Image (spheres, grey):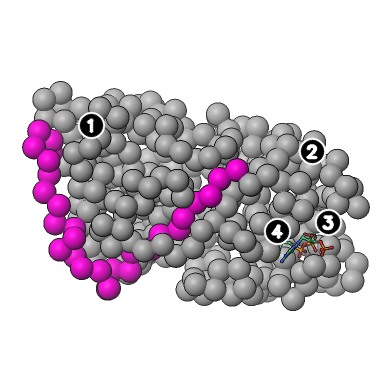
Amino acid sequence: MAFMGVELFDIGATTEEELRSVHRVVLAAQAVDRPDEVPVTFEALVGGLRSPPAGFGPRRYWVARRDSEIVAVAFVNLPDAENSHLALVTITVHPRLRRMGIGTAFLRDLLPRLEGRTVVEGWEITSGGAGEHWATSVGFRVVNTMVLQLLPVADVDRSTWDVPVPAGYRVQDWVGAAPGALLESFAHARNTLRDAPFGDIDFQAPLWNRDRVREAEADLRARGVEQRMVVAVHEESGDVVGVTEVEVRPHRPFWASQRETSVLGAHRGHGLGRCIKAHMARRLLADRPDIERFYTTTSADNAHMIRVNEAIGYRTVRTQVSVKQDVTVLTAHPRVLG
Ligand SMILES: CC(C)(COP(=O)(O)OP(=O)(O)OC[C@H]1O[C@@H](n2cnc3c(N)ncnc32)[C@H](O)[C@@H]1OP(=O)(O)O)[C@@H](O)C(=O)NCCC(=O)NCCS
């Protein structure tokens, strides 16, 4: 089988037949690489392709064909600001056609097309699976290990969500836009995430300020994402000292993506993390009783956050690794050179 080279895939201008071809690759790969997941429907896949997660810059899609059929696909995110040297890349080859050199040939063709990015990172690769074996064989380094945790709402004991607010604090929540009076300290509190352990990955969480918070809120609104925040406010100072964020994306309205959670160093040890996460679960289910599951990823060495999650009903589904390497090193790797 001849590898036909990679081509940019315009998600807005393509046909349903082409999208179905991409769906076949992703669905077949999911069954092999992440068999514990609910199989992605065509509609959910297309919704996710059209409205990728915010915060990681524009996303390009590349495909490779055999005859006219798409057999491999790559998602390439090009984040901005502090991450503008990075390309976040996921290459997926149809399981039927693996170990024939397609993944490596795809990478070879993609590397000169990364719009000047100098470092490639790949995230959420099933630990010990084909992706990790392949990545290390072409020169990537494993730089972090994460656990994926899932909270199946129907099975959980919701009394674990009844967590009292520690003395000296209050809890506040909102959907979409932070109240002006909290904006400054909210932005400051979100920067705590920059200290969370993420191994040796290059990607850095944004350095938040008032303007960037408002820009991110507007971006999520434009994508049709419901962004919910629960914060802990220190009564004495009036400052936000703990933050937790959930996003509900339009193509999967029954799933809640639990994103960042952080508590300022000086306010740790009072149970605020568990308190705001439990409040988030209660509040979201009160407003949207049809939510079926929460899911979240946390660094495997972040034992404290993992325990907090378990205390409110999350269970670990699988372990995933992140890999990275310089474009120049990958380009010169003997396997990539071919
Ligand atoms: C990773 C992936 C793209 C590789 O595609 P592929 O076309 O099978 O890769 P190649 O044929 O180019 O493999 C090259 C080398 O990688 C290594 N490799 C690939 N898959 C492997 C596996 N399952 N076990 C052990 N080594 C493996 C081998 O050294 C292989 O060379 P060999 O076949 O001569 O032994 C494919 O397995 C996939 O789609 N995985 C799921 C998505 C994913 O995790 N992507 C991560 C990359 S960002």
Of the image marks 1 and 2, the number of the one nearer the N terminus: 1
- Alpha-carbon span between mark 3 and mark 1: 50 Å
Instruction: For mark 1, give the secondary structure.
Output: helix
Q: In this figure, which residue is indicated by the disc labeled 4?
A: 133
Q: In this figure, which residue is indicated by the disc labeled 2?
A: 329
Of the image marks 3 and 1, the number of the one nearer the N terminus: 3
Percent across and percent down for residue 135 are 71, 53
* Between 186 and 327, the one nearer to me in the picture: 327
Q: Residue at x 43, y 32 (%)?
A: 194
Of the image marks 1 and 4, the number of the one nearer the N terminus: 4
Asked if residue 303 can be seen in this view, the reply is yes
Q: Which residues are magenta?
A: 143-170
Q: Residue at x 20, y 47 (%)?
A: 275
In the displayed structure, does residue 230 sit left or right of residue 83? Answer: left
Q: Amino acid at mark 1?
A: His
Q: Amino acid at mark 2?
A: Val
Q: Is mark 3 within 8 Å of ligand 1?
A: yes
Instruction: For mark 4, give the secondary structure.
Output: helix
Q: In this figure, which residue is indicated by the disc labeled 1?
A: 267
Percent across and percent down for residue 278 are 22, 53
Contact between labelled residues 2 and 1, with CB atoms less than 8 Å apart: no
Q: Is residue 259 magenta?
A: no
Q: Is mark 4 within 8 Å of ligand 1?
A: yes
Rendering quarter of residue 117: top right
